[in-house]
Amino acid sequence: MLSVDPTNLILTVVNLLVLLVALKIFLFKPVQKIIADRQAEADKQFGEAAARQAEADGLKAQYADSLAGIEDEKKKTLQAARKDADAQYQKIVAEAESKARQIKEDATAEAQHQKAQIIKGAEKEIADMVVDAATKVVGKQSGAEIDRSLYNEFLDKAGE
Amino acid sequence: MEELAKNLMEELECKTVFTIPVLGGLEIKESIVVTWIIMAVLILLSIFLTRNMKIDHISKRQAVAELIVTKLTGIVEGMIGEKGKAFVPYLTTVLVYIGISNIIGLFGFKSPTKDLNVTIALAVMSIVLVEAAGIYYLGVKKWLHKFTEPIAIVTPINILEVFTRPLSLCMRLFGNVLGSFVIMELIKMIVPVFLPTVFSLYFDIFDGLLQAYVFVFLTSLYIGEEIE
Amino acid sequence: MNTLIAIGAGIAVLGALGAGIGIGIATGKATEAVARQPEAESKIRNTLILGCALAEATAIYGFVIALMVIVMLK
């Protein structure tokens, strides 16, 4: 128990060193390697996830952008269409108005023309009638009687 | 009473198991054989535990291996700090070896740490490691200069410390194991049932593991002091 | 001779006195520390156990020397 023996001292030292090397090879190294590997794997996965997240964020922003663009375009198109329609409407109305005016004018002109023609016709007839009556009266009587009879005749004819 | 003393002495004596017939006969003591057994068990166990390890979907075996390694290295790293990472495997090995040696008495073997040769070897290795770490980290000049710190007059005490430190390490471990062994034997002789179980929880398991911890703690303290 | 050896061993074991006093003081201080800072209990307990193990060493030295006295001088 209390005897110191060089052989056993040296053997114990050798034993411990062998144990140290063996444990290092068989226990510490592999376990630490696997833990480091797992850490690396986890880090890699985290990195990938972050990259994917960034990508998704970018895509989202892009989508939002394009969505806003579409909204804008829609509004613009709608506005343009409305304007177009308005213009068309205005134009149609104006056209219709002008056409109506034209028709009215035409009709008035026609009426005027007809009226003029009728009046002309009537005048001519009256003149004819006067001439006729005159010739008739002149042929029958003379003097004041002629005038009176002429007048009467005229009135008669005119009264018809 | 005579018989008790004789029994005790017999138990304490470390017998020569066999003699290797070289260099005039090398006597192999019981403690060395038990150390071999411990080594074989440890190595086989670690080979078994770390067989085909994977990164994910780990087996229970691998989980146990990882738990043991991370816990033990965590304990040692907590003692020695970031700076002495290079010493962690050695200190962990010593921790495991002393711990198992101290409680192997429960399995009917004779504790190797009950043999003075083993504890002397451990202490000498520790102090060699401490001084080597000092030389390696500081260089010979600074290492020598460290003996005259804080003032020149304490140099003899500092030099003496190189010898007292391993002596105290070795004797503390040896004395603790021996003391708890003797007390356990006495208790077993007086009350053979129940009581020894209760006391062996403290003397064999708690004290044995605590002494392993203390040994490694002091060694790492000395190393940390030296490489500061 | 045997009586002298026994007396020597007994005196050597008196070293346990120091360990007892040391552990007592350490435990007392640890209790005070826990009372002052209950949240640091686990740390204090670890330090206490370590300190006790170190203080116990003197008693162990005494024991080893007593044993040596008995074995060597017999």
Image (cartoon, coloured by chain):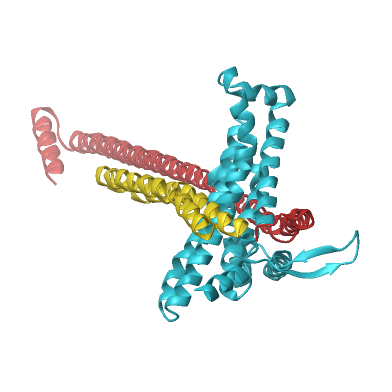
Residue B61: name its quadrant.
bottom right
Q: Nearer the viewer, residue B148 or B182?
A: B182
Q: Nearer the viewer, residue A90 or A45?
A: A45
Residue furthest to the top in view is B152
Q: Note whether B211 is above or below B144 in the view shown.
A: below
Question: Chain A is shown in which shade?
Answer: red
At 65% from the left and 51% from the top, the residue drawn is A40
* Percent coordinates x, y for residue B89 in the rendering: 67, 50
* Percent coordinates x, y for residue A122 in the rendering: 25, 38
At 68% from the left and 43% from the top, the residue drawn is B86
Instruction: Name the quadrant of the N terminus of chain C.
Output: bottom right
**Drawn side of residue C14 relative to residue B7, left or right:** left
Q: Note whether A19 is above or below A154 in the view shown.
A: below
* Residue B29, visible in the rendered structure: yes
Instruction: Name the quadrant of the C terminus of chain C.
Output: bottom right
Question: Chain C is shown in which shade?
Answer: yellow
Q: Which of B92 and B192 is in front in this view?
A: B192
Q: Which of B83 and C33 is in front in this view?
A: C33
Residue B212: name its quadrant.
bottom right
Q: How many labels does the image show?
A: 0
* Residue B76, visible in the rendered structure: no
Residue furthest to the front in view is C1
At 30% from the left and 40% from the top, the residue drawn is A104
Question: Chain B is shown in which shade?
Answer: cyan
* Percent coordinates x, y for residue A80 in the rendering: 43, 40
* Percent coordinates x, y for residue B3 in the rendering: 54, 76
Q: Note whether B97 is above or below A89 in the view shown.
A: below
